[in-house]
Each structure stands twice: as C-alpha cells, then as structure tokens.
Image (cartoon, rainbow, N blue to C red):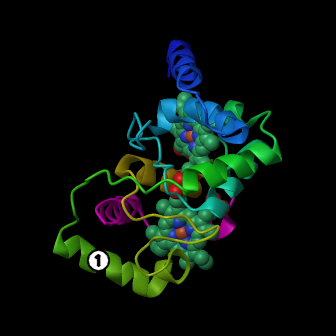
C-alpha cells in the first residue's frame, strides 16, 4: 500500500466529515486509514488482507493488543498498532464489529471437501469454539466467508509460529498437513 493512498483516503474522510458527532468524526477519520486496505465497503483491497467489517468485537480488540505486544507478528500491521492506545483499539473494535459482515462471494466447497472438513471437525472440535456456523462470538473469530488466501496464510503462520498468540491453534494445526490447511480454508471461505 502506497503512502499516497493513505493520504487520499484520509483527505476523503476529512472532506466527508460534516455534522456527525465529535466522537464519530474522530473514529471515522481514523478508520478511513484502515479501510484503505480493509476496504471502504468492507471488501479488502488484497486477498491476503482479512475482512474486518462485522468481525467480532472482542476478537478485533484482542488481535490489535496482541499485535502491539508482538505476540502476532506482521510486517504491515505491526507498525500500524505501534502507538495505538487501548481506547483507540476499543473504538476500532466497536466501529468495525458494528458493520455488516462482507460477503466476498467465494466459491462454495464441493460436497467431497465439505465431508472431509466435517470429519476433521468431528475430531478437532472447531465448532466447539468457532460456533456451529463458524460465526464465532466474543474473542472467537468469525471464520465463515473469510478470504481464502488470508485463511491459508494465517493458518500457516500459526504453524510456523509467526502468529504465536494462541498456543492451542498452533498445536492443533500442527497435527494437519498443508493439504488439510488448504481444504479447511476452501470450506470456510465458501461458507
Ligand atoms: C496497509 C494495509 C493495512 C492497513 C492500513 C490496515 N491493515 Fe489491518 N491488516 C492488514 C493485513 C495485511 C492483515 C493480515 C495480517 C496477517 O496476515 O497476520 C491485517 C489484519 C488485521 C486484523 C486481524 C484480523 C483477523 O481476522 O485476525 C485486524 C483486527 C486489523 N488488521 C485491524 C486494522 C485496523 C483497526 C486498522 C486501522 C487502524 C488497520 N487494520 C489498517 C493490512 C492493513
Ligand atoms: C479451543 C477452541 C478452538 C478450537 C477447537 C479451534 N479454534 Fe480456531 N481459534 C480459536 C481462537 C480463540 C482463535 C483466535 C486466536 C487469537 O488470535 O487469539 C482462533 C483462530 C482461528 C483462525 C484465525 C482466524 C482469523 O481471522 O485470523 C482460524 C482460521 C481458525 N481458528 C480455524 C480453526 C479450525 C479450522 C479449527 C478446527 C480444525 C479450529 N480453529 C479449532 C479457538 C479455537
């Protein structure tokens, strides 16, 4: 993402400011920077960037906190959260979770893939935490319809330890191979 794009997004947000309340102005201006990547209508500008609109509030806050602590490393997000206050993290979490989840219209998985995934779930218990329809809740992330490329990347990051903020997910995903990871991502993305 180029600096100019940030500038343009920020100026656009300032111009659109208007009569909204002082608080809304503040968070909307700030959130415009996020939307330069996570999408103005909620469709991320790159498939390796996750959907943020409609993600669960507790989870958004937790990720920002973990990224700032360095427990979840990412060359793009790490500098963005560096000086972020707790108040701002809570405000972003409230702002983005209140938006409707964005449907990326990704291809539904085949019946054969879905059956394999159900078998994985039967032993791994994904739905025990991520809920029956993979919508998550609180600090459990919404997975259904998340971007395929992002899901593959972040599951590989759990396995490699680049994303070290949840030991459970790391250990669990290390019992699967990369074909399984891609299968899981296909099924989740297509939900
Ligand atoms: C330059 C592009 C860019 C900008 C600007 C940006 N993000 Fe991100 N964001 C990313 C990428 C890429 C990832 C995926 C990181 C990874 O792979 O671990 C991400 C991940 C996240 C996640 C984790 C989501 C999940 O499902 O785990 C949150 C939360 C987040 N960003 C919030 C924000 C907020 C809030 C802002 C504005 C303050 C913001 N981002 C600005 C690119 C960006
Ligand atoms: C014991 C509860 C638990 C189980 C079981 C579980 N997860 Fe998770 N999962 C979590 C939590 C909590 C997170 C968020 C971790 C964090 O970043 O703090 C997570 C994160 C994820 C993410 C990252 C989402 C994002 O937006 O970055 C994916 C993908 C995922 N889980 C897939 C799965 C799959 C597939 C299974 C089954 C094979 C599974 N999980 C089983 C609790 C669980």
- The residue located at (56%, 56%) in the rendering is 97
Disc 1 is placed on an element classified as helix
Relative vertical location of residue 20 with respect to residue 152 in this rendering, above or below = above
Answer with left or right where residue 63 lies relative to residue 158.
right
Q: Position of residue 58 (x, y in %)?
A: 66, 63
Residue found at the far bottom of this picture: 122
Ligand 1 located in image quadrant = top right
**Magenta stretch: dominant SS?**
helix
Residue lying at 57% horizontally and 16% vertically, measured from the top left: 7
Q: Is residue 25 visible?
A: yes
For image coordinates 73% across by 47% down, the residue present is 89
Q: Position of 178 compared to 111: left or right? A: right
Give whichever of 178, 112 is nearer the camera: 112
The residue at which mark 1 appears reads as: 116
- From the viewer's side, name the closer residue of 168 and 129: 129
- Where does the magenta region start and end? 163-191
Residue 111 part of the magenta-drawn span: no
**In the foreground, 152 or 63:** 63
Image quadrant in which you'd find residue 103: bottom left
From the viewer's side, name the closer residue of 187 and 133.
133
Residue 181 among magenta residues: yes
């Amino acid at each position: 993402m180029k600096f100019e794009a940030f500038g343009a997004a920020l100026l656009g947000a300032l111009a659109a400011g208007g009569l909204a309340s002082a608080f809304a102005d503040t968070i909307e201006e700030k959130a415009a920077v996020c939307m330069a990547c996570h999408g103005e209508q909620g469709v991320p500008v790159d498939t390796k960037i996750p959907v943020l609109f409609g993600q669960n509030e507790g989870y958004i806050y937790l990720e920002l906190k973990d990224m700032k602590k360095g427990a979840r490393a990412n060359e793009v997000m790490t500098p963005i959260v560096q000086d972020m206050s707790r108040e701002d993290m809570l405000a972003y979490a409230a702002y983005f979770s209140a938006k409707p989840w964005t449907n990326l219209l990704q291809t539904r998985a085949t019946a054969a893939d879905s059956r394999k995934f159900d078998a994985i779930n039967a032993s791994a218990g994904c739905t025990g935490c991520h809920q029956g329809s993979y919508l998550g809740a609180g600090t459990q992330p919404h997975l259904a319809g998340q971007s395929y490329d992002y899901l593959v990347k972040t599951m590989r990051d759990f396995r490699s330890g680049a994303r070290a903020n949840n030991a459970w997910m790391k250990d669990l995903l290390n019992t699967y191979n990369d074909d399984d990871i891609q299968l899981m991502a296909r099924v989740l993305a297509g939900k």
